[in-house]
Amino acid sequence: EDVPLLYHKFPAHLYAACSRNYDLYFLASSPIMKSSRLKNPAQKGVQEMMKRNIRLKIEYDGTRYQGWQKLGKNVNANTIQGKLESVLSKMTGESIQVIGSGRTDAGVHACGQVANFHTDCGFSCQEIKEYLTKYLPSDIGLLTADEVAERFHSRLNSKQKTYQYRIAVPGTVN
């Protein structure tokens, strides 16, 4: 027997569904209580539409990192994307994929880089920001976290990127 998705009298933003195994979860502030199982695979589409899209604006000192992007299957690579995904996955209990607006090379810094990720978690954007600020290394800073439209993509919706190169020339004042 199918479990109706819309019969519950909770505001829509308190719902989150996990598409794995069609399990339905109700989220309050942070505790997750497993409800009943959905039997109809056609309801999977309804669940996927409920995913939230969170945009992050970050800055970092890239001195000790191997750049922005994870390096293939090398899960031990020390990258900005890897650090964000690790902390977000621990926070949400989900496998999180962070999409960056661009990539930086090893040792390169960023100020105001935009990234986004999709999640079923019920944490507010303020709670996400506070959690990331607390658990990310001190050389990765979170400027903002806000919820955006489901179709927002930090790289594809980027309108402008500014690169600034600083080259130290001996004997001159920068």
Image (cartoon, helix red, strand yellow):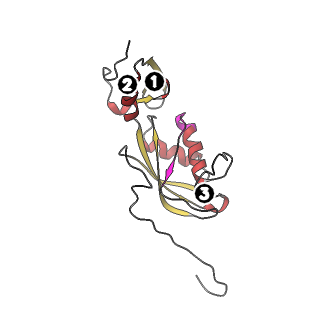
Residue under circle 3?
139
- Report which quarter residue 160 is drawn in: bottom left
On screen, residue 151 above or below 59: above
- Report which quarter residue 60 is drawn in: bottom right
Which residues are drawn in magenta?
90-100
On screen, residue 172 above or below 26: below
Q: Residue at x 51, y 63 (%)?
A: 111
How far apart marks 2 and 1 lie (CA) works out to: 8 Å
Say which quadrant the N terminus sits in: top left
Say which quadrant the C terminus sits in: bottom right
State which tag comes first along the sequence, 2 or 1: 1
On screen, residue 25 above or below 129: above
Magenta segment includes 106: no
x and y percentages locating residue 126 in the rendered image: 44, 44
Q: Residue at x 57, y 61 (%)?
A: 104
Disc assigned to residue 76: none
Q: Residues within 10 Å of mark 1 (few under 14, many from 20)?
A: some
Amino acid found under the numbered disc labelled 1: Tyr
Residue under circle 2?
43
* Residue 50 visible in the snapshot: no
Residue under circle 1?
22
Amino acid found under the numbered disc labelled 3: Asp
Q: Are marks 2 and 1 in contact (CB under 8 Å)?
A: yes
In this view, the residue in front, 20 or 167, is 20
Amino acid found under the numbered disc labelled 2: Gln
Mark 2, secondary structure of its residue: helix
Q: Are marks 3 and 2 in contact (CB under 8 Å)?
A: no
Q: Residues within 10 Å of mark 2 (few under 14, many from 20)?
A: some
State which tag comes first along the sequence, 3 or 2: 2
Q: Residues within 10 Å of mark 3 (few under 14, many from 20)?
A: some
